[in-house]
Amino acid sequence: MTMSVLVAVVVFVGLLVMFGAAWAAVGALASLEQVEDSWVDDLTRRIAATVMPDRSDSLDEVQLALVRAGIERPSSDVVFFAVRATGAIVVPGLVLALLRPDSVLWFAGIVAAGASAGYLLPRVWLDGRIAARQAQIRLAIPSFLEMLVPVVEAGMSVDDALRYVLVELEHTHPVMASIWIRALGRVDLGQSRDRALEDIVVRTGVDELAPVVHLLSRAERSGAGIRDALSARQAAVSEHALRETEQMMGKIGPYLTVAAIVFVLPVMLVVLVGPAIYQVIEMLVPTLGGGT
């Protein structure tokens, strides 16, 4: 009886906290830019403070991870830690409500595993979002250079060429276009051009962008030589992309073989051998039945 009451209390508190934190997170994301001192923001910060690390380097690492995932709202790290704290309470509460453990050992194990899962799942989701975004950026690099090189060779300045290409790139590779548009926006606000472009590699975590950023950051000092450098880089990137495509195509054969063995071969055996087996059974069953 005591265990049932305890489970009910945990579930009720978990659901209450989940509702409050969800309301706080949504409200904070929607209103942090306008209402910094609202009760919603205060509730979100209080929840996040329970799991927020004190070390500044840990906070910087989470903030950088959020930026690399494309989440750049103000105080997004506070909302992220609030979600982690909520998950650490809600997940074990929901699991306990579903499983209803009848022993203290099971109860403690479910609480520990559920709290760990609820705390770690937001980070797993964040890492997956970072990986997906970085894959989109790597995929866009060849197209970006293929569009940029002809425009620069036509005589347009590098900055004007970038702005022209990014307008076209927004339709096909919006993630790649957004990171360059933000960098140019920081330049317009007064940040040094070299610093703004070099921050692209840090804010994305894509090392393949470093040579491109290096070429463009020294464009003002290189003059016309930037055209040849960009052309050479574009050829190297295209060749690398071609090799990766060939490697991926080379892996298709084994995958198709395994798929054929697992899915196609059993069906073919049933179709080809099935009628013969059926005829044998029809001949043997009457004979065996008569013999008995």
Image (cartoon, rainbow, N blue to C red):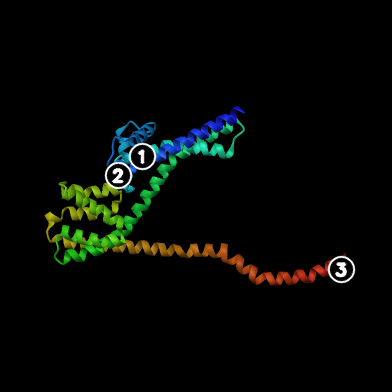
Q: Comparing marks 3 and 1, which lies closer to the viewer?
A: 1
Of 256 and 270, the residue lying toward us: 270
Picture quadrant of residue 283: bottom right
Q: Position of residue 15 (x, y in %)?
A: 48, 37
Viewport quadrant of the N terminus: top right
The CA distance from mark 1 to mark 2 is: 10 Å
Label 2: which secondary element: loop
Please say if the residues under marks 3 and 2 sit with CB atoms less than 8 Å apart: no
Label 1: which secondary element: helix
Q: Residue at x 34, y 56 (%)?
A: 136
Three-letter code for the amino acid on which mark 1 is drawn = Val
Q: Earlier in the sequence, mark 3 or mark 2?
A: 2
Q: Position of residue 64 (x, y in %)?
A: 30, 43
Viewport quadrant of the C terminus: bottom right
Residue 13 in view, yes or no: yes
Picture quadrant of residue 53: top left
Residue 104 in view, yes or no: no
Q: Residues within 10 Å of mark 3 (few under 14, many from 20)?
A: few
The CA distance from mark 3 to mark 2 is: 83 Å
Of 238 and 205, the residue lying toward us: 205
Q: Position of residue 100 (x, y in %)?
A: 59, 36
Please say if the residues under marks 3 and 1 sit with CB atoms less than 8 Å apart: no
Q: Residue 15's mark?
A: none
Disc 3 target residue: 290
Three-letter code for the amino acid on which mark 2 is drawn = Arg
Q: Position of residue 57 (x, y in %)?
A: 30, 35
